[in-house]
Amino acid sequence: MYRRIRDLREDHDLKQRELGAILSCSQRIYSNYERGEVDIPTAVLIGLADFYHVSVDYLLDRTDNPEMNL
């Protein structure tokens, strides 16, 4: 389960359907990403990180620091 992408979506008051549209995928595919039923493609991870202005490592729960290292 990708807890952080769900938490970020909820913190931004977005529905799965809305985020799916932003990422050009269906609500069902996006839901599968959140539940960890399918691996999130790299391009989608980068899109989520850019959208939320956080690092991919933060999304993947590899760090607690949301800052992007540029």
Image: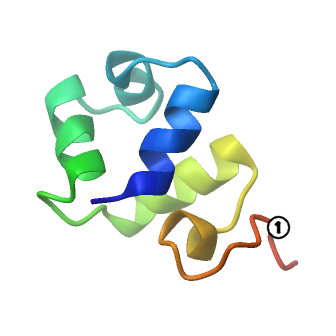
Quadrant position of the N terminus in the picture:
bottom left
Q: Is residue 6 left or right of residue 70?
A: left
Looking at the image, is 13 positioned above or below residue 70?
above
Q: In which quarter of the image is residue 65?
A: bottom right
- Percent coordinates x, y for residue 13 in the rendering: 57, 17
> Residue sitting at 68 percent across and 67 percent down?
55
Q: In which quarter of the image is residue 11?
A: top right
Under mark 1, the amino acid is: Glu
- Percent coordinates x, y for residue 10 in the rendering: 52, 28
Q: In this view, does 2 lie to the left or right of 8?
A: left
- Percent coordinates x, y for residue 61 in the rendering: 51, 73
Q: Is residue 19 left or right of residue 58?
A: left
Mark 1 residue crowding within 10 angstroms, few (<14) / some (14–19) / many (20+): few
Looking at the image, is 54 positioned above or below residue 8?
below
Q: In this view, does 14 lie to the left or right of 36?
A: right
Q: Mark 1 points at which residue?
A: 67
> Residue sitting at 35 percent across and 28 percent down?
20
